[in-house]
Amino acid sequence: MPNVAPAIVARGLAKRFGSTQALDGVSLSVEPGTILGMLGPNGAGKTTTVRILTTLLRPDAGEAFVAGVDVLRDPDAVRRSIGLAGQYAAVDELISGRENLTMVGRLFHLPRQEARRRADELLERFDLVDAADRPVKTYSGGMRRRLDLAASLIPNAPVLFLDEPTTGLDPRSRLELWGIIREQTDKGGTVLLTTQYLDEADQLADNIIVIDRGKVIASGSADELKDQVSNSRLDVTVAASSDFGAVARVVESYGNGTAHVDLARRLVSLAVVARPGLIQSLVRDLDALNIDVDNIHLRRPTLDDVFLTLTGEMAAGDDADNTSSEAAA
Amino acid sequence: MSVTAPAIAATSPAPSHSRLYWAIADTLVVARRHILHIPQTPEQLFSATLQPIMFILLFVYCLGGAINVPGISYVDFLMAGIFVQTIVMEGMTGAMGLATDLKRGIVDRFRTLPMSPVAVLAGPILADIVRNLIAIVVMVAMGLLVGFRPTAGPVEWLGAVGLLLLAGVTVSWIGTVVALIIRDPEAVQMMAFVVLLPLSFASSAFVPIESMPSWLQPVVRHQPVTVIVTTVRGLLIDQPIGSAGWQALAWSAAIIAVCLPVSVMLYRRVQAV
């Protein structure tokens, strides 16, 4: 047996709620010391997967191992190896932040002194020292999420599950949380993170799986996923008075599929295969039609492009007028 | 696949103590948390202290004059009723805490910890017992101030307080079942109000049963609140108890015998949803 077993393995997880097939054969594997980002729209099955892996829910079919332990056969042993921060801050409003953390430590069966010491350490790290002895109901939303994440770290467990940990946080708190999540893997910990924010997965995850309607529809590193969609995207911004139909036809001659036209932003875009001379050639073609060009941008696809291509839906949280809703490769 | 050694050692100590040890230790941790809630929630403080004081004053000075209890002063008659009524209504507090935890995802956090599942249910109930003890002390003090003159010796007091706490635990287990089914603290409170308040008024808690319509009397005479009140009253002011003591114990035993396993079953089923 290899010494380095995956920290998390799931094979063929299935779960049905009534008439809804929430999970339909989800498999995944996370190497120790890495972050797996689980991307998917609302209702895709992210939370259900996390609940199964954290012993909160039994699957109808499939098997799962966390830290080498069978989740279904020995959930108690799994509970000694995991931390979980859910979508909502599962903290007690009426007691102080410090009491919340020591309680979790005690229920993790740490000795009293150790529970106190870890609580102090995490309050410090999460910038909650000043508020430590106030009831949590006086905390801001960001402070509650930080406390919730701190509670999930009390066990100092080797495997951490974070279900949309930054939903509803302001940008500064998000960046702080990202830093803390990265620290986990620096220490050798393994993280499974679900998110609707593509940039979050792009920034944090070593590997990403995209899940939709209970199935894994793509997996790989962020770069691999971007390559999977297309090599490049071409964005052409033209004068408002231009004949957009003509521009689209020109752009389409450089790639496959139908160009996406966004009149409000005067933007025509399409997935293309980049090659030397593409931009000069495009400028000449547009010039021949007397079209005034403001900007031409040949770029790597973003995870948004990947996500939209794969799921065929608008990514949650994105602006309605986002580009490339019909991007195709 | 065979289980390979985990690449990173788990940090939680292996369970070096018995299941029972952790059940008790974890229950104490959870109960401590619910006890810490008491000073933080004015409603809880009110219902355990000011509310019984208010009831004592209203019944003794406003209603008492119109209620005739042959042979004894009204305040001596009333106090057992106030004790039981307060404890019956208080018994839902822990259940409301449990419902809040279920709703807010705190029970989910508990369930991902290697703690004893018993503690999730028993912790709030232990906190109820502590809250009831506070309420009993407050009520006894207030009763003495307005002329309550119990004849009970230490053994009778022990019996009365013991039975009151048992009654509290009984109601707590009913509340636990309700909380696990409806998982909403406001709904739990509503249930308590709609079921428990009539039960405590349609009893011998505040007026002699003989003053009620004859068709109602047989029901009232044997319902759990009455038999508990009769027993507590008998112990405190030396009145005949008859079979009420056994009936009180039988009611509690029967209710707990049903609600405890049902709670455990319902709690296990939380897992499946």
Image (cartoon, grey):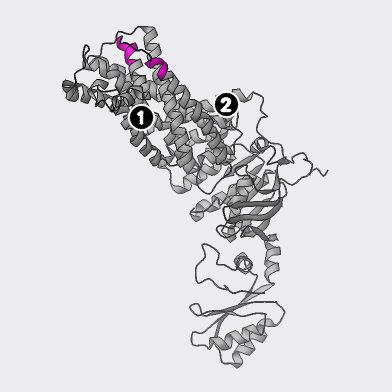
Which residue lies most toward the front here? Answer: B215
- SS class, disc 2: helix
Residue range (magenta): B232-247
Q: Foreground: B210 or A29?
A: B210
Dot 1 surroundings within 10 Å: few (below 14), some, or many (20 or more)?
many
Disc 2 or 1, which lies upstream in sequence?
A: 2
| Residue holding disc 1 | B89
| Residue A143: image location, x then y, percent | 47, 45
Residue A201 in which image quadrant: bottom right
Q: Classify B219 as above or below B111.
A: above
Q: Amino acid at mark 1?
A: Met
On residue B266, which mark appears? none
Dot 2 corresponds to which residue?
B23
Q: On the image, which quarter does residue B52 sit in?
A: top left
**With B169 as the anchor, is A325 left or right in this view?**
right
Residue A86 position, x and y percent, is 55, 46
Q: Amino acid at mark 2?
A: Ala
Q: Quadrant of residue B39?
A: top left
Whole-angstrom CA distance, mark 2 to mark 1, is: 27 Å
Q: Estimate the x, y position of residue A132 in percent, counting from the top left.
A: 47, 36
- The extreme top residue here reads B153
Q: Let me know if marks 2 and 1 both belong to one chain.
A: yes
- Compared across the picture, whether A146 is left or right of A256 comes to left
Query: Does the magenta segment cover residue B236?
Result: yes
Q: Is residue A68 above or below residue A41?
A: above
